[in-house]
Amino acid sequence: MTLTAVDWAVILAYFVLSLVVGVVFSGRAGTSSTEYFLSGRSMPWWLAGTSMVATTFAADTPLAVTGLTVKHGIAGNWLWWSFVMSGMLTVVFYARLWRRAGVMTDAEFAELRYAGRPAAFLRGFRACYLALAVNSIIIGWVTSAMAKIVGLTMGVDKWQAIVVLFLVTGLYSTLSGLWGVVVTDFFQFLLAMTGCIVLAGFALGAVGGLDGLLAALHARYPDDAPLRVVPGLDSEWMPALAFFVYLGVNWWASWYPGAEPGGGGYVAQRILSTRDERHALLAALWFNIAHYALRPWPWILVALTSMVLYPGLADPELGYVHVMVDHLPPFWRGFLLAAFFAAYMSTISTQLNWGASYLVNDVYRRFWARARSEAHYAGVGRLATVAMMAVSGVVTLSIESVEGAWKFLLALGAGTGLVYLLRWYWWRINAWSEVSAMGAALVFSLAAQWGLGLSSDDPRGFALLLLTTTTATTAVWLAVTYLTPAEPRETLTAFAARVRAGGPGWRAIAPDAAGGQRIGAGLLLWVLGCAVVYLGLFGIGGLLLRRPLQGVGALAAAAALTWYLVRATRVAPEAGDRVV
């Protein structure tokens, strides 16, 4: 790709603006750890929700969606579309519970829910596991994807790309804390979405518009398999077993960043940073609508055009980059590269800030230095950010496929999701339940991949891997739960009074806070929330794939259900024993 002076000016302007934001918020971020990691718990819902969306929109996302679509058709995206159901559980049931918990990180939650040395061990272990292992994998695959883009467009090798990307992103995220991260997230998301929509327009122009794209795909694939949203039972593109696992198991069984069962990770961080419970719920709702319904189709359209323009690519993820290189005119080349830098930086800055919050709050302050000043902890947070950048740089060099890294992380967390859902609503869950679930998932996943030869890159292999790991992990943690003592009654009572989850699972401990009759109402709202997102997603798809009646009808239904859902969730915060 040849970049003109105008292209370089656009890219430079973006970087200058990002660094200015970091400098502006550096003073505020350094005053306390709460300001540095949670923005003083004063963030409005629209900013928190947009920041979640921007974090999940990284340089890897369009490439991974392209790979899924080229190899498995549109239906291949059910790998991540299935997480709508997990996300809506967070909206309806868990967003308010996290806000009531009032912790700084989801690792700190361990010592709120559990007691004694097992709780302390779980907190420290989970913090290190997420901050150093999981976080490094995420940063690694996102940086690897961005390095592919930079390499093909600017002719820079992987090492040079990694060093430059880390230096720029690390500088402003280290300076600014969460306020700087979320403010830059907001304009980065707008920039990235605009760039992807523009690219989709130029891609369609290269194949004769939507009609030309559909005609070319139909000529090459007479059964229209790539265009099917729901695959046939005998589909080679998306086997029935894999489709069943995506819809029936994946979303509740696997822990995955941004779609954690019961909330967690940076989603919990953003929820904890909001002004109150209402803002927490609306932030989670906006995130799920924007993440699943508004973003995917520009990427899918480019993926489909790449199937026409570049059939048979050895690495189908690179089809997206080839469309950029070959079909964008000057100015828009620079704009889209700036958009990709924005998508990359919004994700990495969050991962660094989120990971540092674990190392500072749940390891350093909890176990090493308890009585230091807030400014001291904010300073240590900056050092922790730099340390994670170094670890992640090494991991980046070993990652080749974004889709493969996605599936590997899903498999590592398979079977743990049910623990994270039930720990809020069932008193018998204890600290060893979580520890055993995490350990068993890791062991069984690696054993299934290396011992049984189940590959996460193969749809059937991935489905069997997920089923095997989930079944074995669930059996282990349930056995451990009943073989180990329950948490002390005073710990359980205090937790039940603080978060007021309600439900029949607490009747034995806190009968006054049971509120089980509201679970049914919450499940109904959960179904409606899932319908909102899927109707929006497939309504937009219907319009783009020349199915106007289907598209308009679905979008109208989604709008009506959204209005009802927002009104139905207006429950006063003091009505704590209600689910919604």
Image (spheres, rainbow, N blue to C red):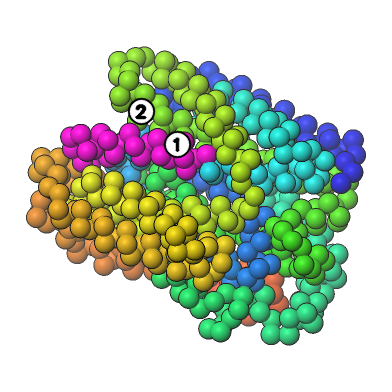
Question: What residue is shown at x 37% (from left), y 52% (from top)?
Answer: 443
Q: Is residue 348 above or below residue 443?
A: above
Amino acid at pointer 2: Val
Q: Secondary structure at mark 2?
A: helix
Q: Secondary structure at mark 1?
A: helix
Q: Quadrant of residue 525?
A: bottom left
Point out which mark residue 131 bears. 1
The answer to whether residue 393 is left or right of residue 312 is left
Residue 129 within the segment the image draws in magenta: yes
Res. 190 visible in picture: no
Magenta-colored span: 110-136
Point out which mark residue 363 bears. 2
Q: Earlier in the sequence, mark 1 or mark 2?
A: 1
Q: Position of residue 37 (x, y in %)?
A: 44, 30
Question: What residue is shown at x 49% (from left), y 40% (from top)?
Answer: 135
Amino acid at pointer 1: Ala
The answer to whether residue 115 is left or right of residue 526 is left
Residue 579 within the segment the image draws in magenta: no
Q: How many marks?
A: 2
Q: Position of residue 36 (x, y in %)?
A: 46, 26
